[in-house]
Image (cartoon, grey):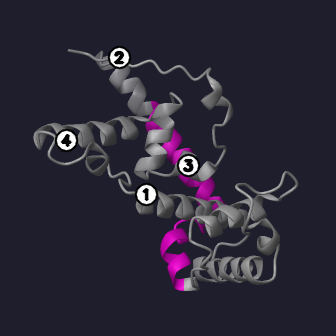
């Protein structure tokens, strides 16, 4: 039995689609779910979802589907995932290819943002003001999702170290992933899976 899913992305949620390239490149379960929601799953995404659903079926529903898919299943887990996503977005905005140094820059920026930056005036807001820069937006949501506590350099490093690659390596990785996805899709299409 073949199940075909068509997702309508013309509704109001399509307009609020995040434009983060971290979400596009990441293999984190929440990024995979976002790509499914917007009708852009890769073959790796389909395989990850298949394994998660098969795990759920095999345990006969005793383990929540969120856990089988590797998704955060508690409010605290979702909050931490949002914080980490914003830190990874921030890491992409930082120039440099040295992870440890880049994470130190993020820690310094975040500390300044919370202690003597605009956080003092923005902390009552649900979202940053319209004129905020991309860095300020990422810092705003990272701070909001971390209970106004700044992580230290080592903690930020654990979250963001994979973001800091030489720019030439990032381009090479993207080209390699694109080539693999295209050739894999063509092969399966020829075999009659789609």
Question: Could you say where residue 43 lies in the image, as x and y percent from the top left?
Answer: 39, 35
Tally of numbered discs = 4
Task: Write down the residue under mark 4.
Answer: 56
Sort mark 3 into few (<14), some (14-19) or many (20+) by Cα contacts within 10 Å: many
Label 3 to label 1, Cα distance in Å?
Answer: 20 Å
Q: Earlier in the sequence, mark 1 or mark 2?
A: 2
Which residue is drawn at the image coordinates 72% and 69% (left, top)? 94
Give the magenta range. 154-182
Label 2 to label 4, Cα distance in Å?
Answer: 20 Å
**175 is within the stretch colored magenta:** yes
Q: Earlier in the sequence, mark 2 or mark 4?
A: 2
Q: Nearer the viewer, mark 3 or mark 4?
A: 4
Label 3 to label 4, Cα distance in Å?
Answer: 25 Å
As drawn, 48 above or below 188: below
Task: Write down the residue under mark 1.
Answer: 75
Report helix, strand or loop for mark 1. helix
Residue 10 visible in the shown view: yes
Task: Write down the residue under mark 2.
Answer: 4
Residue 23: image tag: 3
Q: Earlier in the sequence, mark 3 or mark 1?
A: 3
- Asked if the residue at tag 1 contacts the one at tag 4, i.e. Cβ–Cβ closer than 8 Å, the answer is no
Which residue is drawn at the image coordinates 75% and 83% (left, top)? 115
As drawn, 145 above or below 67: below
Q: Nearer the viewer, mark 2 or mark 4?
A: 4
């Amino acid at each position: 039995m073949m199940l075909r899913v068509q997702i309508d992305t013309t509704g109001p949620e399509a307009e609020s689609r995040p434009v983060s390239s971290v979400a596009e490149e990441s293999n984190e379960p929440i990024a995979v779910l976002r790509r499914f929601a917007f009708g852009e799953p890769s073959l790796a995404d389909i395989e990850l979802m298949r394994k998660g659903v098969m795990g759920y079926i095999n345990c006969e529903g005793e383990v929540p589907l969120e856990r089988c898919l590797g998704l955060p299943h508690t409010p605290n887990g979702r909050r931490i995932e949002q914080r980490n996503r914003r830190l990874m977005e921030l890491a992409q905005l930082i120039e440099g290819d040295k992870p440890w140094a880049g994470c130190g820059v993020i820690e310094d920026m975040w500390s300044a943002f919370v202690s003597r930056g605009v956080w003092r005036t923005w902390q009552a807001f649900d979202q940053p003001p319209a004129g905020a820069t991309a860095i300020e937006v990422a810092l705003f949501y990272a701070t909001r999702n971390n209970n106004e506590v700044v992580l230290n350099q080592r903690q930020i490093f654990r979250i963001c170290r994979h973001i800091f690659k030489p720019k030439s390596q990032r381009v090479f990785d993207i080209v390699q992933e694109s080539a693999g996805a295209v050739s894999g899709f063509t092969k399966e299409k020829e075999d009659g899976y789609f």
